[in-house]
């Protein structure tokens, strides 16, 4: 799976499946919303934006499903 910026995606949360868009790919370790993430070229993370709330979160690419 190769995501691109702006792709529509789905991911799971404690409240159930959430839909939104992929806004930024991260391939190096970074801090987002006070949490550290160990992103790499082989294990990238995406900043995603929820359709419902507009909130942003970081998720592993492997946890995102294109819609």
Image (cartoon, rainbow, N blue to C red):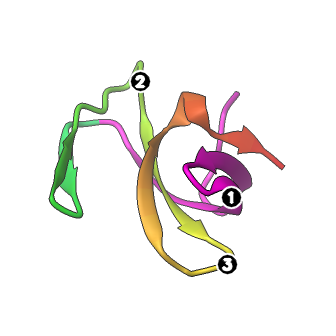
Q: Nearer the viewer, mark 1 or mark 2?
A: 1
Residue in view at x 42 percent, y 33 percent: 44
Give SS at disc 2: loop
**Segment colored magenta:** 1-27
**How far across and down, in percent of the image, does residue 8 sit?**
75, 58
Residue in the picture at 55% in, 68% down: 49
Seen as rendered, the residue at the extreme bottom is: 53
Q: Earlier in the sequence, mark 1 or mark 2?
A: 1
Can residue 21 be found in the magenta stretch?
yes
Badge 2 is on which residue? Answer: 43
- Can you name the residue that lies furthest to the top here? 42
Mark 3: give few (<14), some (14-19) or many (20+) Cα within 10 Å.
Answer: few
Q: Residue at x 57, y 28 (%)?
A: 62
Label of residue 52 in the image: 3
Q: Name the dominant secondary structure of the magenta segment.
A: strand
Image quadrant where residue 6 sits: bottom right
Query: In the rendered view, does 36 fall on the left or right side of 48?
Result: left
Query: Disc 1 to disc 2, how far (Cα)?
Result: 21 Å
Residue at 48%, 75% in the rendered image: 55
**Which residue is label 1 attached to?**
18
Residues packed near mark 2 inside 10 Å, few (<14), some (14 to 19) or many (20 plus):
few
Instruction: Please give left or right for residue 49 compared with residue 21 in the image.
Output: left
Name the foreground residue: 2 vs 62: 62
Observer-side mark, 3 or 2, equals 3
The percent coordinates of residue 61 (x first, y second) are 54, 35
């Amino acid at each position: 799976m190769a995501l691109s910026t702006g792709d529509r995606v789905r991911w799971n949360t404690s409240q159930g499946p959430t839909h939104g868009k992929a806004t930024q790919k991260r391939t190096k370790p970074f801090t987002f919303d006070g949490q550290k993430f160990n992103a790499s070229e082989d294990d990238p993370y995406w900043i995603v934006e929820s359709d419902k709330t507009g909130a942003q979160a970081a998720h592993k690419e492997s946890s995102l499903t294109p819609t």
